[in-house]
Image (cartoon, rainbow, N blue to C red):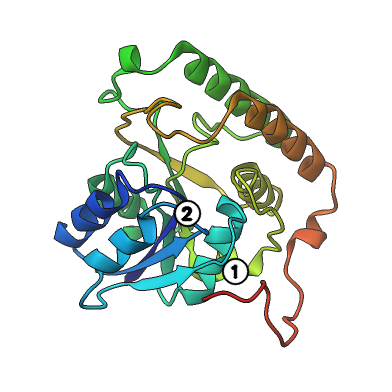
Amino acid sequence: MVLSVIIPVYNEESTIALVLRKLLALSFPFSVEIIVVDDGSTDRTKELIDGVNQDNVFKVHSSLINLGKGAAVRFGLEYASGDYVIIQDADLELNPEDIIKLVQPIAGGGVDVVYGSRFKSRTTRIASVPWYTILANKILSFYTNLLYGSKLTDMATSYKLARTDLIRSINLRCIGFEFDPEITAKLLRLGHRIVEVPISYEPRTTEEGKKITWWDGFRFMYYLTKFRFQKADSFVKKARKSGAAFPAST
C-alpha cells in the first residue's frame, strides 16, 4: 500500500520544517509519499520547505496566490499516486505518529474512509482545549449527525483518510476551510461509512497562528445544510475535460 500525505500550508514558518522532519523520521509499515502544497505563503515557509527538501524526497506545489485550504488539498490530489490519501495540517496540532493509527482500520478491509477524532481520545488534554472549541465541535458534530444520520464526534478534524480514487470521484468545489463540511457531507450522502479513530490533539491559539475563526463555524453549518438538500448524483464527478483545473502556478 502507498499512502499519499497532503500537507496544505500557508504562512507556517514556525512549524512547517518540524512537521516535515517528523514525517520523514517516522518508520511507516507501508510506503508513503509526501506532497506539500504551499498556498501562496508570504513568509519564510517556502524557503523552509525547500531547505528540508534539498534531496527532493517529497513533492512540492507552490501556488502564486493564497486560495484556501480546499484549493490546496485539491492541488495535492493532482499529484497523489498513492492508494490512499490523508491530509496533514502544518501547524502541529495533530501528531504525525497518529497516521499509523488511522491506517489500521483499512488494513482489515471493508473500510474506505477514516477520520481522526480529537475528542474521542483519552490522551486529549481537554483542560488545554478552549471551551469554545469544544462547544463549537459538539454543535457541528451534532448538526452533521442530525442531518446525515451519522455518529461522528469530530466532523472538522484535519485527519481525513480515504481511498484516493474515491476522493477523486467526488465533485469538490470548495476552496477554503469549508472543504471539511463539503467532503464529509458528500461522503455521507453517497453512502460511505466514516470510521473514527482517537488521536492526540495539542490546540494552538490565534496568537500562535491558528487561522480558523468562529465565523467559519457558521459557514460550516451553511454548507452542511446546503449539501444535505442537493441531489447526491451531482456530487459524482463527470468525465474529466482536458485542460487545467486551476490557475497557473509555479
Relative height, residue 113 to residue 134 (above, below): below
On residue 63, the disc is none
In front of the other: 160 or 92: 92
From the viewer's perspective, is the residue at label 2 or at label 1 nearer? 2
In front of the other: 37 or 113: 37
Say which residue appears at 37% left-offset and 48% top-offset. 90
Q: Of helix, strand and loop, which one carries label 2? A: loop
Say which residue appears at 75% left-offset and 81% top-offset. 239
Q: Where is residue 105 in the image (x, y as percent from the top left)?
A: 35, 51
CA gap, disc 2 and disc 1: 29 Å
- Kindly indicate whether the residue at mark 1 contacts the one at mark 2 (C-beta within 8 angstroms): no
Q: What residue is disc 1 on? A: 168
Q: What residue is disc 2 on? A: 42
Counting residues from the N terminus, which is met first, the one under dot 2 or under dot 1?
Answer: 2
Q: Is residue 145 visible?
A: no
Q: What residue type is labelled 1?
A: Arg
Say which residue appears at 26% left-offset and 78% top-offset. 56
Circle 1: is it few (<14), some (14-19), or many (20+) Cα within 10 Å? some
Quadrant (top left/top right/bottom left/bottom right) for the N terminus: bottom left
Q: Of helix, strand and loop, which one carries label 1? A: helix
Relative height, residue 215 to residue 228 (above, below): above
80 relative to 124 in the view: left or right: right
Q: Which amino acid does label 2 sit on?
A: Thr
Q: Position of residue 201 (x, y in %)?
A: 33, 31
Relative height, residue 199 to residue 46 (above, below): above
Q: Position of residue 211 (x, y in %)?
A: 51, 36
Q: Is residue 122 visible?
A: yes
Relative height, residue 33 to residue 229 (above, below): below
